[in-house]
Image (cartoon, grey):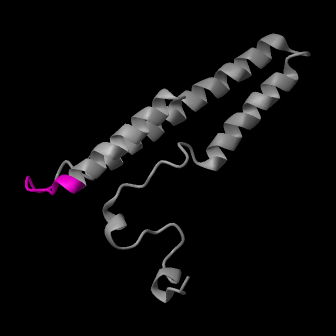
Amino acid sequence: MMYDQSRAQQPAGKASGRDERRAPRPDALFPSGERDKVLQRLGQAVNAFADTPREALEKAEGAFDEAAALLADALAEQRRLLREGWQDRDPETQSAELRLALRQYREVTQRLLRL
């Protein structure tokens, strides 16, 4: 494989050329720091159960509520990005671009249904 200097100089994770028009693919729904905080709170709840069961359950419920809120926010942002990719485009938008948007909706929806 030949070294591509222009590609190597791009920031990590940045697509080049035609792929720049795509909405980012959903690799992780939550930022890892936020996910780790919720998991830490849940772990603390599990570890505290033997000593303070009711308090542990309240902590677990709080972790659940926080995860649900993060999910709702992540899904709203994903929807915004997907819609941004096609909604305000020229009515003459190429079928290939619309097909790409449809594929992205399908992938995200299928991923959501696997949760």
Q: Is residue 51 magenta?
A: no
Asked whether residue 9 appears in the rendered view, the answer is: yes
Residue 54 appears left or right of 63: right
Q: Residue furthest left?
A: 92
Q: Residue at x 36, y 55 (%)?
A: 23
Query: To which quarter of the image does residue 55 belong?
Result: top right
Please name the residue shown 46% across and 69% down the image.
14
**Viewer-proximal residue, 64 or 112?**
112
State the extent of the magenta-drawn residues as a range. Answer: 89-96
63 is higher (above) or lower (below) than 80: above
| Residue projecting furthest to the right | 51
Q: Main secondary structure of the magenta part?
A: loop
Number of numbered discs visible in the structure rendering = 0
Name the one closer to the observer, 40 or 26: 26
Query: Percent position (x, y) of residue 69?
Result: 52, 31
Image x and y of residue 64, in percent:
63, 24
Q: Quadrant of the N terminus?
A: bottom right
Does residue 18 appear left or right of residue 43 in this picture? left
Relative to residue 52, is residue 44 depicted above or below? below
